[in-house]
Image: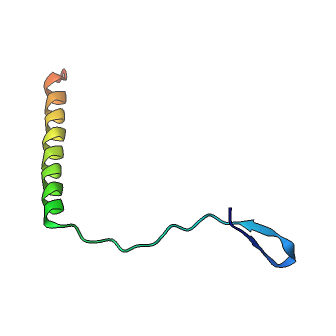
Amino acid sequence: MPYTTEEGGRLNNFAREPKVYTAEPPTERQKRNYIILGITATILVGGLIFVAFSVSNVS
């Protein structure tokens, strides 16, 4: 653990700082995969809502 000593002899224990890096923009393949996953998720949620309304006892 990294300790630092302040004035007066007090010890402080600080959390380790993560490495900082810059994010890279998504590639064309990643963009395509995001679109496909979004469409798939929308269809799945729409289907679940349709099934929920179909089996409910709404009179």
Instruction: Spot the residue most to the front.
Output: 1
On screen, residue 12 versus residue 44, left or right, reads right
Q: How is the image coloured?
A: rainbow
Q: Residue at x 79, y 68 (%)?
A: 11
The quadrant of the image that shows the N terminus is bottom right
On screen, residue 42 versus residue 21, left or right, reads left
Image coordinates of residue 59 in percent, x first then y, are: 15, 22
Q: Is residue 11 above or below residue 46?
A: below
Image coordinates of residue 30 in percent, x first then y, are: 18, 60
On screen, residue 22 versus residue 32, left or right, reads right
Q: Residue at x 12, y 42 (%)?
A: 43
Location of residue 54 by image quarter: top left
Instruction: Spot the residue most to the right.
Output: 8
- Tag count: 0
Q: Is residue 49 above or below residue 58?
A: below
Q: Is residue 59 visible?
A: no
Q: Residue at x 18, y 56 (%)?
A: 34
Image coordinates of residue 5 in percent, x first then y, are: 78, 73
Image coordinates of residue 27 in percent, x first then y, are: 18, 67
Q: Is residue 23 above or below residue 35?
A: below
Q: Residue at x 45, y 72 (%)?
A: 20
Location of residue 49 by image quarter: top left
Q: Is residue 31 visible?
A: yes
Q: Is residue 27 above or below residue 42?
A: below
Q: Report the front residue among 52 and 26.
A: 26
